[in-house]
Image: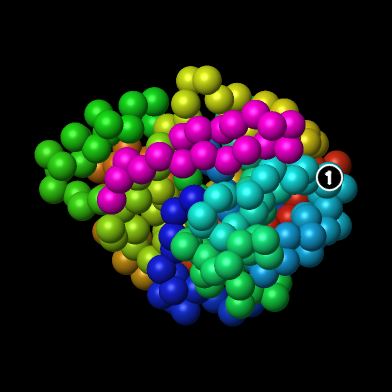
Amino acid sequence: MESIPRRTFLALTAGAAVASRLSWAAEQVPSLLDHILLGGNDLERGIAFVEQHTGVRAAFGGVHPGRGTQNALLSLGERRYLEIIAPDPGQSGMQQYSVISKLNEPRLIGWAAHRDNLDQFARQLRQEGIEFEGPQPGLRQRPDGKLLRWKALRLKDDRGGLLPFFIEWSKESVHPSVDAPKGCTLRRFEATSLEAEDLLRLASRLQLDLHVLTAKERFLRAVIASSKGEFSISS
């Protein structure tokens, strides 16, 4: 949906996407989190990667016309889902997410937060002096022929991909989490930054209850639970 600057990936850790299995006392996820994006240069490889660690196979979602990408989806609970996104070989070039064509192994590349009224939210951002692009319309045709429609807004400064883009789903569209394959939940989602206090202040202005840790390197981490246990994916 929205583009992630190349600097996001250059600033993030170069370690494996899957960390050691973890156990958390309670769910710690931003209340407005809509979905997380796992990017890679091959959709089937991304699907197999997730299935290997969760036992759940994501379902093909469709292509993004004119954007050069395709996706597969997996529910992470109520109004939350995982989007596996990769280049669409049926389209020439990518308008967005061009960096994923270089990712041989799937990595977390960003996240989206939902808003019920994106136009009103845009007005609030203007009043706060926060620069953004959009809202812009988007659509995707599902394999069953139904159309999903949404509007998206992207911050001009998303702190290197640590902050989300914002999405408002059309009232006529069924949220992807409803009929995507079940069996997984998102237990924890966090960001790390050397400038953690600054990131927290901006997240608060955006009405985001994002969990932020102080670290030398900047990255996102998500912990997903399934019948096979918990595993961590990171950017």
Q: Which quadrant of the view contains residue 142?
A: top right
Please name whichever residue, 16 or 70, is drawn nearer the observer in this view of the structure. Answer: 70
As helix, strand or loop, the secondary structure at mark 1 comes to loop
Residue 68 drawn above or below residue 5: above
Main SS of the magenta segment?
strand
Q: Residue at x 67, y 61 (%)?
A: 90
Q: Identify the magenta region.
A: 133-150
For image coordinates 52% across by 65% down, the residue present is: 94
Q: Residues within 10 Å of mark 1 (few under 14, many from 20)?
A: many
Instruction: List x then y, in percent, for residue 215.
Output: 44, 70
**Of the pair 28 and 208, the residue shown nearer to us:** 208
Q: Is residue 141 magenta?
A: yes
Q: Quadrant of residue 146?
A: top right
Amino acid identity at mark 1: Val
Which quarter of the rendered picture does the C terminus lie within?
bottom right
Which residue appears farthest toward the top when viewing the image?
172
Residue 131 or residue 220, whichever sits in front: 131
Could you tell me how many numbered marks the image carries? 1
Locate residue 141, reporting x and y percent.
62, 38
The answer to whether 85 appears left or right of 119 in the picture is right
In percent of width and height, residue 132 lies at 25, 51
Task: Kindly identify which residue carries mark 1.
Answer: 56
Looking at the image, is 125 positioned above or below residue 179?
Answer: below
Q: Is residue 87 left or right of residue 55?
A: left
Identify which residue is drawn at 54% across, 69% down.
93
Q: Is residue 144 magenta?
A: yes
Q: Position of residue 91 (x, y in %)?
A: 61, 62
Q: Looking at the image, which is closer to me, 88 or 37?
A: 88
The reply to whether residue 178 is in sight is yes
